[in-house]
Image (tube, rainbow, N blue to C red):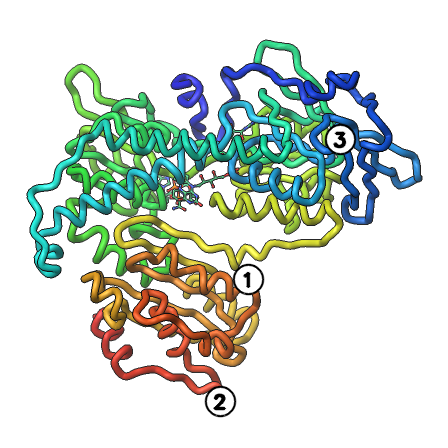
Amino acid sequence: MEAMLASRNVTAGVNAGWSSSSSSMLCPGEKAALNGVRCNGLRFGGSKLLRREVRVSERGVRGAVTGKGLGLGVRAATGNGAAQQFDYDVVIIGAGVGGHGAALHAVEKGLKTAIIEGDVVGGTCVNRGCVPSKALLAVSGRMRELRDEHHLKALGIQVAAASYDRQAVADHANNLATKIRGNLTNSMKAIGVDILTGVGSVVAPQVVKYGKIGFSDKTVTARNIIIATGSVPFVPPGIEVDGKTVFTSDHALKLEWIPDWIAIVGSGYIGLEFSDVYTALGSEVTFVEALDGLMPGFDPEIGKLAQRILINPRKIDYHVGVLAKKITPAKNGKPVQIELIDTKTKETKDVLEVDAALIATGRAPFTKGLGLEKVNVVTQRGFVPVDERMQVLDSEGKPVPHLYCIGDANGKMMLAHAASAQGISVIEQISGRDNVLNHNSVPAACFTHPEISMVGLTEPQARALAEKEGFKVSVAKTSFKANTKALAENEGDGLAKLIYRPDTGEILGVHILGLHAADLIHEASNAIAMGTSIKEIKYAVHAHPTLSEVLDELFKSAKLDEHHAAVETEETKQIVEAVAA
Ligand SMILES: Cc1cc2nc3c(=O)[nH]c(=O)nc-3n(C[C@H](O)[C@H](O)[C@H](O)COP(=O)(O)OP(=O)(O)OC[C@H]3O[C@@H](n4cnc5c(N)ncnc54)[C@H](O)[C@@H]3O)c2cc1C
Ligand SMILES: NC(=O)c1ccc[n+]([C@@H]2O[C@H](COP(=O)([O-])OP(=O)(O)OC[C@H]3O[C@@H](n4cnc5c(N)ncnc54)[C@H](O)[C@@H]3O)[C@@H](O)[C@H]2O)c1
């Protein structure tokens, strides 16, 4: 497993392949075989009464379900009226959160579904991403609070010095991943999704093969194929990962040791979340960021505030505008060496010597060996090109019929819930209901303490769009210092920012830094998804005293044109100005 994970890092944009596969093979029709149905190939029998009839509409399939879970073939009417049989309505390659979301929704819509997994169910999010990292962050949040004398004193609490057991913390993360992996597997098995073990690839339109490396492959036919093969850590050239002193998030999540001094290369989501974990557990952190400021992906104002709250008061220093050109792991008594060069001039700037280096420089799609060339698809830096409906595009930019790609592998938005939402959208389409996911309504969150969350456009993005399309943009802000619940928790550090159109009341973006920001963002993301304007949402009632009143206050403080006059309290204005100062 270790070797396999190590081989899955991607260096310089070249996709890693699979080195092995450990699990035993499952025939899609093991149950079907009992009914005299062949495991591979196109000929599947079974009772006509139990067979599912699938009708093809212009965009996808309308079907009535019969014989689900019995491994029986499904029959589709082709354009010329001839019947064509498929083993499955949907075959999904990759059982990460994207594939899982698609599989569950497919069964709900009556589609006979199989999912192929080459490693373990749950993919990155469950095994090497969201789930174990949030377990570590739960510990870092508590450690941070228990060690913050000033904060505890303000609440009147006294505690003896807090400490932690590294292995027990690591076990908490690992156990949680195991539990969630089991939940995901059981949720699919319970509803009759066939879980096929092995590495899958496309061999022809609507035909997929899968198998354990070194063993003969099995073939299944599918009315629709969904690629959901995810991503792996991207390691820039010149960086030597040994998995011990120079490592990616895959290794860091195991928390095998706590370095006294760790360099984190990249200040995006992974870098920032791990800086929260490591500093809470006692490490000193040095960020190395290629762009001119830390957290370049965030709204600049939120990034600035995050620097004041999450970076400056902690044992963190940073080098920005520099690339880690070469990193050599610790060996022969020498520490980890990091050669820094200026991003623009490429001149050598510095050499850092640290105990460890975490490489958090983004993720690369895991799409090599998928056989896409067989259907005339050329990947772009490894990403599978798709249209807004996640239909895979061929080398001429035309959609390949019945072939979709969701999640990290298409690179549209590398987030777990985005992968799952794209999967649901695809299933809606192949069930005969057109569906386009509004990616602008998909929230994102960074689970630091306090958290950062966002949905829609940043202020510079909104202003650029406004200039292009000729509309006006306004910004409203509220502070957590004006929120009773936040003050009761002694957690007044934080800001919520609304970017909107004053003429229509359209919400263009919302950014929050503060206690439970990751939960608070959903009122805004749902409003964007539903097309709810500020004119409507500002009259929604919020329980008092709750953190959700931060957003209530935010929407109420928007100044809408003419008769949509703003209600902005003088108090909020003063606090926001004080926070910004
Ligand atoms: C440290 C870290 C923390 C993260 N935290 C968050 C978070 O808090 N919130 C969030 O939204 N996102 C988070 N992410 C991102 C999130 O994990 C991904 O966006 C998400 O996992 C993508 O889902 P996916 O289904 O596209 O791919 P994956 O989860 O990568 O799953 C792909 C699956 O396909 C399998 N596979 C690949 N190729 C084949 C093949 N040929 N045949 C068969 N199977 C194959 C893989 O083994 C894998 O199981 C985090 C990522 C990392 C690294
Ligand atoms: N809470 C979450 O939702 C969460 C948590 C972790 C990861 N993720 C997802 O995982 C993906 C990967 O996260 P990530 O933090 O690795 O990527 P990222 O794209 O968020 O950040 C990478 C950072 O590394 C910098 N960088 C790149 N090459 C560099 C180099 N050679 N030297 C110095 N700096 C360099 C970039 O400028 C950027 O700031 C993200 O797309 C994110 O969506 C999400």
Write the residue at 79% across / 32% down: 74
**Quarter of the displayed picture in which ligand 2 can be seen:** top left
Residue 326 visible in the current orientation: no
- Distance (Cα) linking label 3 and label 1: 34 Å
- Distance (Cα) linking label 2 and label 1: 26 Å
Mark 3 vs 1, N-terminal side:
3
- Distance (Cα) linking label 3 and label 2: 57 Å
Q: From the image, state whether disc 3 or disc 1 is nearer to you.
A: 1
- Identified by mark 2, the residue type is Glu
Relative vertical location of residue 37 with respect to residue 362 in this rendering, above or below: above
Residue 31 coordinates in the image, percent (x, y): 69, 21
Q: Residue beneath label 3, please?
A: 205
| Residue 562: image tag | 2
Write the residue at 84% across / 27% down: 47
State which quarter of the image contains the N terminus. Answer: top left
Callout 1: few (<14), some (14-19), or many (20+) C-alpha neighbours within 10 Å? some
Relative vertical location of residue 402 with respect to residue 144 in this rendering, above or below: above
Q: Residue beneath label 1, please?
A: 529
